[in-house]
């Protein structure tokens, strides 16, 4: 999954820990998302809001369509 979370975070001069804290998620979860792992819709919403963006900007942050892993997390 290609997303722009890291680029948007770095543009705001935020560390992973800072953005994770603002979003209410763990830094490990954020690192996984930035490296392309899928996440739930609620987690995406938290990150978008923590970046100071609107939920309607989700495609700008996470890409569009099924390739972005919209809310489905497969078991391991």
Image (cartoon, grey):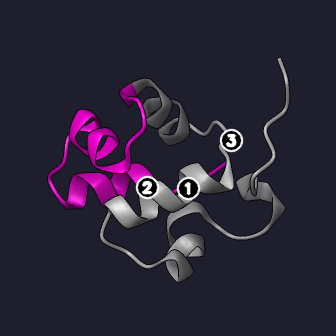
Q: CA distance from mark 3 to mark 2?
A: 13 Å
Q: Which mark is residue 44?
A: 1
Q: Is residue 63 above or below residue 39?
A: below
Between marks 3 and 2 in the image, the one whose residue lies nearer the viewer: 2
The outermost residue toward the top is: 76
At mark 2, the secondary structure is helix
Question: Few, some or many C-alpha atoms within 10 Å of disc 2 (few <14, some 14-19, many ≥20)?
Answer: many
Q: CA distance from mark 1 to mark 3?
A: 10 Å
Q: Which mark is residue 47?
A: 2
Looking at the rendering, the stretch of residues picked out in magenta corresponds to 1-27
Q: Which mark is residue 38?
A: 3
Which image quarter holds the C terminus? top right
On whether residue 25 falls in the magenta region, the answer is yes
Cβ atoms under marks 1 and 2 closer than 8 Å: yes
Residue 8 image position (x, y, % from top left): 33, 60
**Which residue occupies 78% across, 56% down?**
67
First in sequence, mark 3 or 2: give its number: 3
Left or right: 75 as drawn, with respect to 50: right
**Which residue occupies 35% across, 55% down?**
7
């Amino acid at each position: 999954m290609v997303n722009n979370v890291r680029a948007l975070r770095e543009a705001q001069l935020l560390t992973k820990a800072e953005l994770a804290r603002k979003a209410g998620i763990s830094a490990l979860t954020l690192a996984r998302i930035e490296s392309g792992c899928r996440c739930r819709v609620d987690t995406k919403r938290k990150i978008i809001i923590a970046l100071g963006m609107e939920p309607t900007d989700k495609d700008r942050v996470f890409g569009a369509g099924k390739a972005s892993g919209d809310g489905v997390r497969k078991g391991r």
